[in-house]
Image: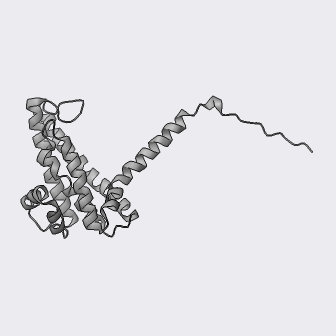
Amino acid sequence: MSLSFIETFRGMIASPGETIRKSSSGTLTDSIIYFLIVIFIYSVLTTIIEQFVGPVLPIPFSPGADIAAAIGFIVALVIFGTITLLIAGAIIHICAKIVGGKGDYTATVRAFSLSETPMAAIGWIPFIGFLASIWGFILMILGIREYHGISTIRAVIAVLLPAIVIIILAVLGLMFFMIDPTSVTVTEIPSVTV
């Protein structure tokens, strides 16, 4: 990205639209590095908060229980976060293309990466951290709109399309498993003898 980490982070909080435009020339590596720093900050702050007030995330263990678990939590979140960034970036990129997006994969990953800024800013704060998800969703839409040159409505569809597909598949799956196999009748085809 053409801006430093601090400039980008501050800009995504104070003037996200302008910062998204200024960050349009960043590389895939720049986006991944920004994302890793944001996730690392979030992981460390979450672990520290959990030492004092308990779990921020609904997970079955408290990573603050001992230092090894805390370090493991941070490392796992960074590794799996990066994998999620690349895979979700690909999925959202395909969806952006479906709705007429003109940007490339790097632009989609950049939008995803920048949209994670609220997690480091407020995502770790108990009781209000959920606002980071809403804020991030809005930033993702702004980024996809800007980097793919599509309308806000198309950007919303591109971001929501994966969730819509998952919901439809889940409903169809539930319907399939709710069919009572005893209610389906199979008729025997009569054999013809010659």
- Residue 152, percent from left and from top: 30, 61
Image height of 185 relative to 136, above or below: above
- Residue 70, percent from left and from top: 13, 36
Quadrant in which residue 92 is drawn: bottom left
- Residue 13, percent from left and from top: 12, 55
Image height of 64 relative to 99, above or below: above
Examine the rendering and report whether any part of residue 166 can be seen. yes
Q: If the image is split into quadrants, where does the N terminus sit?
A: bottom left
Q: In screen coordinates, is 55 left or right of 175?
A: left
Q: Residue at x 18, y 68 (%)?
A: 21
Examine the rendering and report whether any part of residue 106 can be seen. no
Q: How many marks?
A: 0
Image height of 99 relative to 180, above or below: below
Q: Residue at x 30, y 64 (%)?
A: 105
Colour scheme: one colour
Q: If the image is split into quadrants, where does the C terminus sit?
A: top right
Quadrant in which residue 5 is drawn: bottom left
Residue nearest the observer in this picture, 101 or 83 = 101
Q: Residue at x 14, y 64 (%)?
A: 19
Q: In screen coordinates, is 28 left or right of 155?
A: left
- Residue 66, percent from left and from top: 11, 31
